[in-house]
Image: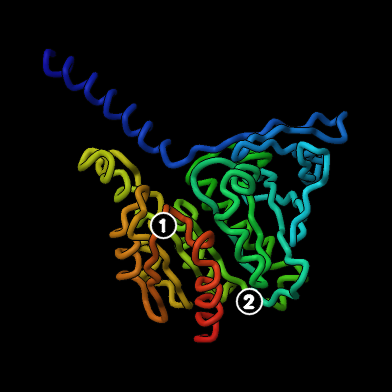
C-alpha cells in the first residue's frame, strides 16, 4: 500500500509533465473574431517604436495597413486575404502575396513557426519570408488552427492536417497551376514541411527547410534531457519522413541559431536523399530571407532545374 501511495502521485506528475511538454510546441496568438454586425475591425500594432493601424474586413479578413499619419501603407506586392476550410473542419485564414512588378513562375507555400500569427509574422517578423517577393516568387502564407483568425484549437495533429489542406487549396488555384510549387517551412513549419512534402510528393516540385528541428523528441531532449525525450510523444518526425522524400531539397540552417541547434539541420540533411543541398548561413534563427534572399532565391531556382 505504501508503494502504491508513492507510485500513483509519481505517475500523475509524469502524466501532467508529459502534457505540458507536448503543449510547448505551439504558442499561437489568437485574434478575436469580428462580430457579424460589423463591417470591419481596427487593431493598433506597435512595432520598432512605430505604430501601425490594421483594418480587417469582416468575413474575408482583408487587411489594410495605415500609418500614424493616416496614410495607407504601400507595398510592392498585393495581399489577397483568403478563408479556406481545413480537412479538420476549421476555417483557416491565409494571405496570397503577389509581386506587382513580376509574373511569377514559382509559388511558395509557407509554413510558419510555432508562435504568433500572420499579423505578427507580417509586422514584427516582416523579414522572415516577404523579401523573396522581390525576386519574383508569389507566396501563400496561412495560420494553422487556433492561430490568428483561423478557427479551432492549436494542436500538432491539426497543424499537420492544416498543412495538407493548404497544399490542396493552393493546387486548385488557376494562378498556381502553371507555376512550380515549392513548400518553404521555417522552424516548426520546417519540421512540418518535411512531413507534408513526403506525403504529397506528386503535388510539389521542391522543398525548402529552414531552421527546423529533426523531431519533437530531439528538441525536447535539448531542453530537458532524457526526461524530455521520454515524455514527449512523436506524432510525426521530419528526420524519418525525409528518408522517403525524393524530390529536390534545400536545407538552410544558421550556425548561430540559438533556438534550434545546427546539428538538427545536419541530421535532417544526412537522412535525406539526393538531389539535396545544405546551405549553411549565419545570423539568427530563421533569418535566412532577411540576409540571404538573393542567394536563397537563386538556390531555389537551381534546385528546380535539377528535376
Residue matched to label 1: 283
Circle on res. 163: none
Quarter of the image where the N terminus is located: top left
**Rendering coords of residue 61 (x, y %):** 77, 43
Q: Which mark is residue 180?
A: 2
Q: Earlier in the sequence, mark 2 or mark 1?
A: 2
Q: Position of residue 302 (x, y in %)?
A: 52, 82
Total labels: the figure holds: 2
- Where residue 227 sits, quadrant-wise, is top left
Locate residue 99 relative to residue 141 in the image: left or right: right
Residue 253 falls left or right of residue 36: left
Percent position (x, y) of residue 250? 45, 72
Name the spot of residue 136 as percent of width and height, x first. Answer: 67, 72
> In percent of the image, x 54 and y 46: which residue is there?
158
| Element class at badge 1 | loop
* Residue at mark 2 to residue at mark 1: CA–CA distance: 29 Å
Amino acid at each position: 500500500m505504501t508503494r502504491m501511495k508513492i507510485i500513483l502521485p509519481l505517475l500523475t506528475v509524469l502524466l501532467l509533465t508529459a502534457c505540458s511538454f507536448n503543449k510547448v510546441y505551439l504558442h499561437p496568438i489568437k485574434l478575436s473574431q469580428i462580430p457579424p454586425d460589423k463591417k470591419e475591425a481596427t487593431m493598433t500594432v506597435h512595432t520598432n517604436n512605430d505604430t501601425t493601424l490594421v483594418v480587417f474586413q469582416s468575413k474575408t479578413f482583408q487587411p489594410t495597413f495605415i500609418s500614424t499619419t493616416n496614410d495607407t501603407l504601400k507595398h510592392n506586392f498585393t495581399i489577397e486575404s483568403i478563408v479556406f476550410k481545413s480537412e479538420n473542419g476549421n476555417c483557416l485564414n491565409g494571405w496570397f502575396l503577389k509581386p506587382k512588378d513580376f509574373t511569377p513562375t514559382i509559388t511558395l507555400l509557407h509554413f510558419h513557426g510555432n508562435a504568433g500569427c500572420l499579423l505578427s509574422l507580417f509586422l514584427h517578423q516582416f523579414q522572415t519570408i516577404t523579401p523573396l517577393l522581390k525576386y519574383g516568387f508569389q507566396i501563400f502564407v496561412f495560420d494553422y488552427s487556433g492561430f490568428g483568425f483561423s478557427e479551432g484549437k492549436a494542436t500538432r495533429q491539426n497543424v499537420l492536417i492544416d498543412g495538407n489542406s493548404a497544399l490542396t487549396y493552393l493546387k486548385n488555384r488557376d494562378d498556381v497551376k502553371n507555376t512550380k510549387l515549392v513548400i518553404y517551412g521555417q522552424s516548426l513549419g520546417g519540421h512540418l514541411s518535411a512531413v507534408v512534402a513526403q506525403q504529397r510528393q506528386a503535388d510539389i516540385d521542391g522543398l525548402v527547410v529552414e531552421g527546423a528541428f529533426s523531431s519533437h523528441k530531439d528538441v525536447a531532449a535539448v531542453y530537458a534531457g532524457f526526461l524530455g525525450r521520454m515524455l514527449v510523444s512523436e506524432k510525426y518526425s521530419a528526420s524519418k519522413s525525409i528518408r522517403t522524400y525524393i524530390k529536390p531539397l534545400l536545407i538552410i540552417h544558421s550556425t548561430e541559431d540559438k533556438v534550434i541547434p545546427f546539428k538538427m539541420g545536419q541530421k535532417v540533411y544526412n537522412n535525406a536523399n539526393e538531389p539535396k543541398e545544405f546551405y549553411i548561413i549565419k545570423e539568427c534563427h530563421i533569418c535566412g530571407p532577411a540576409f540571404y534572399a538573393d542567394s536563397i532565391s537563386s538556390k531555389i531556382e537551381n534546385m528546380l532545374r535539377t528535376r
